Image: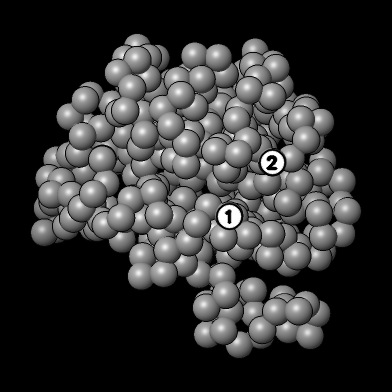
């Protein structure tokens, strides 16, 4: 959510209230990242520290949540798991994190209803924050299972903040019924991927591009049937890879790993999901059939019930046939 804000909305919120430029072009220079201007992990995560200052009221929080759903629906996305970080959204005004969760839940469900998009929420836990924050987020998320919150997402700079301190909290959340995805193998080595799968019992790995460096990590991912949420544009913009054709996505597919594509932070990178797939076809020489397979993998790896997954898969397969017939 925090990485999905429209520049026009940021400009409107910032105008007269924050020490940020109200001019959209100046905001883009400050808050957007492109492959021509890659950032270090520290610089990239610093953008989120700036964005945290924007969440000044329940109305603003609900507005940006609604707009994220609207933008996804305009892209033709059928199912969205929207990640949001309760601690980040509550920081500017000291809101209670439970209130923030409820505001976001209410906004996304109301926005989704008329748009034909199904939305669930993943509550984010930042590696750089105290474990006590993670405990609060996990408890609040468990309380809202069945009401739209389906899982947790551990994110942040793994090179400076390993996942180990969060093991107890995340394993407890899994046992309580929440799903788990973990950013790993992005800015650190394959050991973080292995740990996320082996100890944290993560079902999905965010990025995971370093997994191929360790056969044990690959073998465990295959054994656990884990899904990798791969985001090439993000990896390019944050210096994980040096050029579009260097991305290891084809090698991950060749190794048998289950992969799908995502945008990571579309507001920051200025991309859509369609852009991401088009770039993968162009730069990584992926076939249309491979792309379709990744889209179906996304449905299979969704944090839904088995029946909901089957329905989503069937809906996507029908859309493939319609698209091909139209072409």
Compared with 246, 198 (above or below) is above
**53 vs 176: above or below:** below
- The reply to whether discs 2 and 1 touch (Cβ–Cβ < 8 Å) is no
- Near-viewer residue (143 or 316): 143
Is 42 rendered above or below residue 212?
A: below
Which is more toward the observer, 310 or 57?
A: 57
**Residue visible at 73% across and 51% down?**
88
Q: Position of residue 290 (x, y in %)?
A: 17, 39
Colour theme: one colour
At 52% across and 31% down in the image, what residue appears? 181
> Disc 1 marks which residue?
42
Residue pictured at 70% horizontal, 79% vertical:
20
**Split into 4 quadrants, where in the image is the C terminus?**
bottom left
Q: Is residue 304 left or right of residue 94?
A: left
Q: Which residue is mark 2?
A: 128
In what quadrant of the picture does the N terminus appear? bottom right
State the image coordinates of residue 206 (x, y, percent, origin top left): 46, 37
Q: Residues within 10 Å of mark 1 (few under 14, many from 20)?
A: few
In the rendered structure, find residue 78 and report the number of the disc placed on it: none
Q: Residue at x 68, y 25 (%)?
A: 166
Left or right of 232, for residue 109 = right
Q: CA distance from mark 2 to mark 1?
A: 12 Å
Question: Measured from the top left, where is residue 6 in percent x and y?
Answer: 56, 70
Residue 313 visible in image? no
On screen, residue 158 above or below 85: above
């Amino acid at each position: 959510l925090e990485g999905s804000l429209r520049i026009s909305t940021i400009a409107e919120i910032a105008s007269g209230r924050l020490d940020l430029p109200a001019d959209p072009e100046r905001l883009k220079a400050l808050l957007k990242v492109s492959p021509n201007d890659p950032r270090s992990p520290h610089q990239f995560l610093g953008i989120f520290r700036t964005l945290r200052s924007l969440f000044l009221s329940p109305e603003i929080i609900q507005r940006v949540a609604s707009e994220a759903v609207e933008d996804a629906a305009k892209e033709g996305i059928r199912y969205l798991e929207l990640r949001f970080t309760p601690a980040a959204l509550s920081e500017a005004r000291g809101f209670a994190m439970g209130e923030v969760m409820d505001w976001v839940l209410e906004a996304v469900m109301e926005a989704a209803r008329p748009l034909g998009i199904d939305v669930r929420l993943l509550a984010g836990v930042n590696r750089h924050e105290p474990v006590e924050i993670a405990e609060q987020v996990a408890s609040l998320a468990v309380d809202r299972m069945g009401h739209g919150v389906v899982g947790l997402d551990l994110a942040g700079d793994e090179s400076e903040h390993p996942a180990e301190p969060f093991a107890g909290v995340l394993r407890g959340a899994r046992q309580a019924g929440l799903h788990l995805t973990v950013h790993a193998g992005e800015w650190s080595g394959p050991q973080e991927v292995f740990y996320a799968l082996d100890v944290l019992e993560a079902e999905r790995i965010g990025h995971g591009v370093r997994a191929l460096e360790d056969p044990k990590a690959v073998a465990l991912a295959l054994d656990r049937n884990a899904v990798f949420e791969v985001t090439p544009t993000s990896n390019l913009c944050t210096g994980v890879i040096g050029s579009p054709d260097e991305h290891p996505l084809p090698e991950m597919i060749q190794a048998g790993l289950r992969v799908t594509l995502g945008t990571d932070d579309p507001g920051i990178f200025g991309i859509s999901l369609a852009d991401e797939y088009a770039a993968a076809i162009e730069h990584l020489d992926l076939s249309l059939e491979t792309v379709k397979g990744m889209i179906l993998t996304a449905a299979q790896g969704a944090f839904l019930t088995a029946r909901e997954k089957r329905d989503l898969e069937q809906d996507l397969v029908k859309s493939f046939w319609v698209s091909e017939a139209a072409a």
